[in-house]
Structures are given as C-alpha cells and as structure tokens.
Amino acid sequence: GTVGLGTDFPSKIVRLSLEDYGGKLVCQRGAFLAGSHTVDIEMEFTKKLSTGFFGGEGFVLQSLSGTGDVFVKAGGALVRRDLEEGESLRVSSGSLVGFT
C-alpha cells in the first residue's frame, strides 16, 4: 500500500535503516513519524548531552530500536556528521535530530 507523511512545520522527512546504526537510534522527541512494525519506541532521558545545554537538568528523547526503517523529520538544513573516537561536537538541543 501507499502512505503519505507530513509534518507540522516545513521540514525534511528522512528514511533511515536502523541496521545502519547498530539497531538503535536516539532522536529528539517528536522527530519520529513512522516505522516498520519491528521498531520499538521508548522514551529516553539523558543528562550526558545536556550538561552543556541545560546545566545538567537533562531532557527527553525518543529511543528507536529494532530492525527495519524509520522515518524522522528534520527542520532546516540536514548535516550528517560521523565523529571519530574521542571527538566531540557541541550542538544546540533544538538542532539535534538524532544520534547513536
């Protein structure tokens, strides 16, 4: 069958295979739009990334795990950045789409 996906604001819809990310992808809350029936969606709380953003208060994310494809929304320009071992990147929490 066919399905149409839309977003609540102008953004890109990105199709990702969880297998390409080790079976788990953590996204900003609300980024997940749709996925295979083999994808589990759970809330994830983190303090690690928030240290620089919120003074250690933490924030809520979505954990997508399993196998198959997911569709996530990303507003604005989309940049994929693979970090080397030990490399870090400071990102505004409002600009983060997902990470592993």
Image (spheres, rainbow, N blue to C red):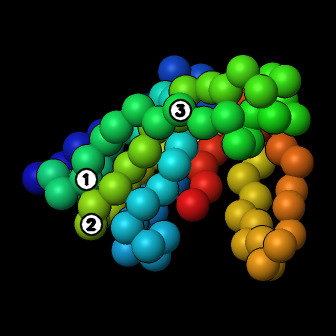
Q: Nearer the viewer, residue 57 or 96?
A: 57
From what the image shows, is residue 33 above or below residue 69? above
Badge 3 or badge 2: first in the primary sequence? 3
Q: Quadrant of the C terminus?
A: bottom right
Name the side, left or right, on which 99 lies relative to 85: left
- Check disc 3 and report the residue beneath it: 45
Q: Nearer the viewer, residue 31 or 46?
A: 46
Mark 1 or 3: in front is: 3
Name the side, left or right, on which 53 lies relative to 29: right
Residue occupying image coordinates x 31% and y 41%:
41
Question: Where, by quadrant of the figure, is residue 89 drawn?
Answer: bottom right
Q: Secondary structure at mark 3?
A: strand
Residue occupying image coordinates x 78% and y 72%:
83
Residue occupying image coordinates x 47% and y 36%:
44
Q: State the mark number for residue 4.
A: none
Image spot of residue 20 (x, y percent): 46, 75
> For the residue carrying disc 3, how many other residues have a C-alpha within 10 Å: few (<14), some (14-19), or many (20+)?
few
Distance of label 3 from label 2 (alpha carbons): 22 Å
- Check disc 1 and report the residue beneath it: 39
Q: Secondary structure at mark 2?
A: loop
Distance of label 1 from label 3 (alpha carbons): 19 Å
- Check disc 2 and report the residue beneath it: 67
Q: Amino acid at mark 3?
A: Phe
Badge 1 or badge 3: first in the primary sequence? 1
Q: Are marks 1 and 2 in contact (CB under 8 Å)?
A: yes
Q: Secondary structure at mark 1?
A: strand
Q: Amino acid at mark 1?
A: Val
